[in-house]
Image (tube, grey):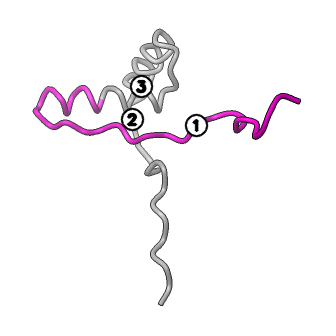
Amino acid sequence: MAAPPKKAAKKAFALRLDPALHDAVERLAAGELRSVNAEIEMLLREALKRRGVEVPVTARPRRGRPPKEGGEP
């Protein structure tokens, strides 16, 4: 039996936005030093929280080089 497929770290999908709405989100994102994608995710989380839906933040893998094993070089 085949192993189940691994779940993607992020769900990708196409999102069509009104250009004026995209420009507004882009300005917000620039002011917060975020990408447009990260800003949309933040806005969605805030909107859901206001409606009483708490969505946990998934732990992301660490970025950068792994720590050196052993002593100093």
Of the residues shown, which amino acid type is indicated by label 2?
Answer: Leu
Could you tell whether 66 is left or right of 30 in the image?
A: right
In front: mark 2 or mark 1?
A: 1
Q: Label 2: state its secondary structure.
A: loop
Q: On residue 39, which mark appears?
A: 3
Give the crowd class for mark 3: few <14, some 14-19, many >=20 residues within 10 Å: some
Of the residues shown, which amino acid type is indicated by label 3?
Answer: Glu
Q: Quadrant of residue 58?
A: top left
Of the residues shown, which amino acid type is indicated by label 1?
Answer: Arg
Cα–Cα span, label 2 and label 3: 14 Å
Cα–Cα span, label 2 and label 1: 32 Å
Q: Which residues are magenta?
A: 44-73
Extreme-top residue of the structure: 31
Q: On residue 31, which mark appears?
A: none
Q: Is residue 45 above or below residue 8?
A: above
Could you tell whether 64 is left or right of 50 in the image?
A: right
Q: Label 1: state its secondary structure.
A: loop
Quickly name the residue at label 2: 17
In front: mark 1 or mark 3?
A: 1
User: Is residue 20 rendered magenta in the image?
Assistant: no
First in residue order: circle 1 vs circle 3: 3
In front: mark 2 or mark 3?
A: 3
Q: Residue at x 48, y 50 (%)?
A: 9
Q: Looking at the image, can residue 13 be seen?
A: no
First in residue order: circle 2 vs circle 1: 2
Q: Residue at x 25, y 26 (%)?
A: 46
Report the label total.
3
Residue 40 point in image, percent of width and height: 38, 30
Residue 41 point in image, percent of width and height: 37, 33
Q: On residue 62, which mark appears?
A: 1
Q: Residue at x 41, y 43 (%)?
A: 15
Q: Residue at x 14, y 26 (%)?
A: 50
